[in-house]
Image (cartoon, rainbow, N blue to C red):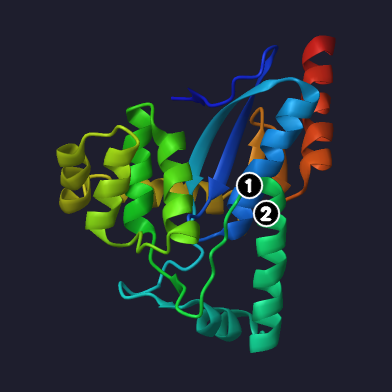
Amino acid sequence: MAEQQTEQPGPVVQVDIVSDVMCPWCIVGFRQLEQALAAVGVGAYVRWHPFELNPQMPTEGQNLTEHIMEKYGSSQEQSEANRTHLQSLGQELGIDFAFTPESRIVNTFQAHQLLGWAQTEGLQHPLKMALFEAHFTEGRDVSDPAVLVEVAESVGLDRARAAEVLESGELAEETRAHQAFWTSRGISGVPSMVFEGKYLLTGAQGAQTYAQMLRKVLEEREAA
């Protein structure tokens, strides 16, 4: 089930985005994609797909700086410089990365289950945006079922049903299968955007690169 997220006039391009709520470059890449869509004058059907950067992350999560230093071998100075760069880039794109010394990386498996359910309700995209904001701007714990339910309700999803989805784990197996589908096709980093089911761009590539891809898709469509 695809959801039309943009309101640009003209043709519509399908964009599948493999992403994790913990990934700042995923929201950066999406905002750059929005700029490209506006520049080219096309709309998009956007579907979000699950990927866990840290599938073994415990429930309590881990301090962000500590995690980055351990996972990537970065120094504290490098980690801080990267955050400053992200904050500057975010300002240009309307994203408030409110990093603090207490910022944490948390487990996102339940968030992905909720996003899978939200897609069937036609509200996956608003939920994804709200989860990015809850994590990066508000510093909320999006591994906490109570927080997830509140965020779901804020975008118009049924609170009781959201709680049921999380408590029952009814979408756990489906979410794992969905993750496996993408990793089996070579996806190892996010954001990974697939245009019209054919062309893959990995990483936040910038509005210009996304615009070039959109034009390529439209040219091929017109030539067919």
Callout 1: SS: loop
Snapshot quadrant of residue 170:
top left
Q: Amino acid at mark 2?
A: Gln
Please give the residue where the numbered disc 2 appears in the rendered image: 91
Q: Position of residue 189 (x, y in %)?
A: 62, 58
Q: Is residue 199 above or below residue 80?
A: above
Q: Is residue 131 above or below residue 44?
A: below
Residue drawn 25% across and 48% down?
149
Which residue is nearer to you in this view: 87 or 168? Answer: 87
Residue 203 in view of the camera: no
Callout 2: SS: helix
Q: Position of residue 1 (x, y in %)?
A: 43, 25
Count of numbered badges drawn on the protein:
2
Left or right of 19 in this view: 115? left
Q: Position of residue 44 (x, y in %)?
A: 62, 25
Left or right of 150 in this view: 25? right
Q: What's the mark number on residue 171?
A: none
Q: Amino acid at mark 1?
A: Gly
Left or right of 24 in this view: 123? left
How crowded pointer 2 is (Cα within 10 Å; few <14, some 14-19, many 20+) is rated as few
Snapshot quadrant of residue 147:
bottom left
Q: Position of residue 124 (x, y in %)?
A: 41, 35
In the rendered structure, are the residues bearing label 1 and label 2 in contact, judged by CB atoms less than 8 Å apart? Answer: yes
Q: Is residue 180 above or below residue 64?
A: above
Which residue is nearer to you in this view: 188 or 34? Answer: 34
Residue drawn 82% across and 41% down?
209
Please give the residue where the numbered disc 1 appears in the rendered image: 94
Q: CA distance from mark 1 to mark 2?
A: 5 Å
Snapshot quadrant of residue 77:
bottom right
